[in-house]
Image (cartoon, helix red, strand yellow):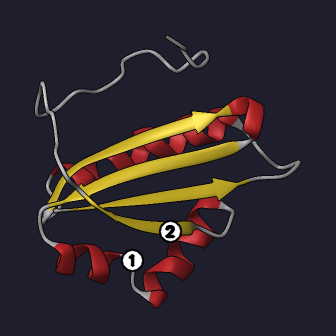
Amino acid sequence: MIAVIVSFRYGKDFSVAKVHQLAQTSRAKFETMAGLRLKLFSVSPELQEVRNIYVWDDPEAANRFFSPESRGRIAALCGAEPIIEYAEVCALVERSLVRATKEPCTGVARV
């Protein structure tokens, strides 16, 4: 199992509303993606940053998804170059298989 953390750092063209819209419109395509166990969409308004986390059962599927060609498409779709990091998953705790946020994020909860 492999995790892929994809970050986008924005400048003055940052829009939380656009991030939410992109997450909602692209969500369905990931629900049935082969080799993908889960994807988390997140946004940090104060940092003007988006960070998406993917957990793949199949590392080869992750490599295919983040090929050089697809990185260009991702950048065009998201409006910023993706910063892609790979990490080995040591353990995964899952409480539910599919969970969608009904309400838009209003901020970051810190505990």
In percent of width and height, residue 12 lies at 88, 48
Q: Nearer the viewer, mark 1 or mark 2?
A: 2
Q: Quadrant of residue 65?
A: bottom left
Which labelled disc corresponds to residue 84?
Answer: 2
- Residue at left offset 12%, top offset 24%: 95
Query: Dot 1 corresponds to which residue?
Result: 66
User: Separation of disc 1 and disc 2 at Cα?
Assistant: 8 Å
The amino acid on which the numbered mark 1 sits, given as a three-letter code, is Phe
Name the N-terminal-most of marks 1 and 2.
1
Q: Position of residue 44 (x, y in %)?
A: 64, 34
Local SS, label 2: strand
At x 12%, y 65%, the residue is 35
In the image, taking residue 26 as reference, residue 94 lies left or right, namely: left
Taking the image as shown, residue 33 lies to the left or right of residue 101, namely left
Residue 3's x, y, as percent?
30, 59
Q: Residues within 10 Å of mark 1 (few under 14, many from 20)?
A: some
* Extreme-bottom residue of the structure: 68
Q: Quadrant of the N terminus?
A: bottom left
